[in-house]
């Protein structure tokens, strides 16, 4: 069997993704009931972080421990990666010792190059282009609160960034409609939009995009690596804030999500995380459960 990777949501079929969400929900139930599980006993996940993280690191590390395995935190500062060892050489070595490798980095090409020679599964834990692990948690959260997302309308408000690109992939894989409200010049990649034009539309007005939607979702205006653009972006994105007024245009039981970390007063208003529509803490917790299901799928084919 060839090694399976998870670099974008399109690496798994819609059926596999549906099953993975079912498994995540079951794992969450078992964990809450105090069941001990050792499906990944003696297995090791190597975690390479070239960018900061709270949720991703803790969820992968805790997840491996909860399944009886272990996780290694590797930063470029302390490994030969930071001193220029080629990514392919690093991949060949680490993937001979670890049962899976998780990478958070800048260029998406880095995870593709790493995976192209890896002997074990590689997981994209965020690149400049995609953040597929977050979408597993978001899809689990929608399912838990509202049932199937098939045919629903999701409105993305803000930057056409890595999260937005993964929402486009999710629209395809989970079969929902996606409206993207973003300022001119901040659209997701044209090829990605063109490939998904049946389900995905760009609408300039956040109000128009929010009207009647089943879910509103946003992310920071300046992503990691774009700190220098913060000021210009704050100006361009000023009308693109999720707040109770915008939320009131959506369907009466619409959900609000944010991958976090959030910037109150920028992409969301001060108390949006506590709004009655907000499921952000469940969404954050579900990183743990969804990724445990992902690790079992990739490492033992569960
Ligand atoms: N949402 C998310 O990936 O958070 P971290 O950057 O804290 O991992
Ligand atoms: N778009 C954000 C997501 C953080 C989880 C970033 O890349 O910084």
Image: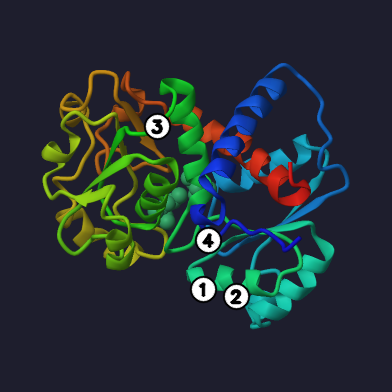
The Cα–Cα distance between marks 1 and 2, rounded to whole angstroms, is 6 Å
Q: Earlier in the sequence, mark 1 or mark 3?
A: 1
Label placed on residue 109: 1
Label placed on residue 51: 4
User: Nearest the camera: 177 or 260?
Assistant: 177
**Residue at disc 3, secondary structure:** loop
Q: Is residue 141 left or right of residue 265?
A: right
Q: Position of residue 54 (x, y in %)?
A: 55, 45
Q: Is residue 302 left or right of residue 57?
A: right
Q: Is residue 17 above or below residue 231?
A: above
Ligand 1 within 8 A of label 3's CB? no
The Cα–Cα distance between marks 4 and 2, rounded to whole angstroms, is 18 Å
Q: Earlier in the sequence, mark 4 or mark 1?
A: 4
Q: Quadrant of residue 297?
A: top right
Classify the position of the N terminus by image quarter.
Answer: bottom right
Instruction: Identify the residue at image location x=62%, y=48%.
Output: 57
Q: Earlier in the sequence, mark 4 or mark 2?
A: 4
Ligand 2 within 8 A of label 4's CB? yes
**Residue at disc 2, secondary structure:** helix
Circles 4 and 1 in contact, beta carbons < 8 Å: no
Callout 4 crowding tier (Cα within 10 Å): few <14, some 14–19, many ≥20:
some
Q: Position of residue 111 (x, y in %)?
A: 57, 68
Circles 1 and 2 in contact, beta carbons < 8 Å: yes
Colour convention of the picture: rainbow
Q: Which residue is mark 2?
A: 113
Q: Is residue 257 left or right of residue 299?
A: left
User: Nearest the camera: 124 or 190?
Assistant: 190
The Cα–Cα distance between marks 4 and 3, rounded to whole angstroms, is 31 Å
Q: Which residue is mark 3?
A: 149
């Amino acid at each position: 069997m060839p090694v399976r990777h998870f670099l974008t949501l399109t690496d798994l079929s819609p059926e596999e993704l549906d099953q993975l969400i079912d498994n995540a929900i079951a794992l969450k139930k078992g964990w809450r009931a105090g069941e001990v599980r050792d499906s990944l006993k003696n297995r090791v996940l190597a975690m390479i972080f070239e960018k900061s993280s709270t949720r991703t690191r803790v969820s992968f590390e805790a997840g491996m421990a909860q399944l009886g395995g272990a996780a290694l935190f590797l930063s470029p500062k302390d490994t030969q990666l930071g001193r220029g060892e080629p990514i392919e050489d690093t991949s060949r070595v680490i993937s001979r010792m670890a049962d899976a490798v998780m990478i958070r980095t800048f260029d998406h090409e880095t995870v593709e190059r790493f995976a192209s020679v890896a002997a074990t599964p590689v997981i994209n834990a965020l690149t400049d282009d995609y953040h597929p692990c977050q979408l597993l948690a978001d899809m689990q959260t929608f399912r838990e609160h509202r049932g199937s997302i098939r045919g629903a309308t999701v409105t993305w408000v803000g930057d056409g960034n890595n999260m937005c690109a993964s929402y486009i992939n999710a629209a395809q894989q989970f079969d929902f409609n996606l409206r993207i409200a973003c300022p001119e010049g901040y659209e997701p990649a044209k090829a990605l939009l063109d490939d998904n034009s049946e389900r995905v539309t760009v609408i300039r007005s956040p109000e128009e995009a929010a009207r009647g939607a089943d879910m509103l979702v946003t992310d920071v205006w300046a992503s990691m690596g774009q700190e220098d653009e913060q000021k210009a972006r704050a100006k361009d994105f000023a009308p693109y804030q999720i707040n109770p007024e915008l939320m009131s245009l959506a369907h009466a039981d619409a959900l609000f999500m944010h991958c976090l970390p959030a910037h109150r007063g920028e992409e969301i208003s001060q108390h949006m995380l506590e709004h009655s529509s907000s499921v952000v803490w469940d969404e954050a917790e579900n990183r743990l459960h969804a990724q445990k299901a992902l690790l079992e799928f990739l490492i033992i084919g569960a």
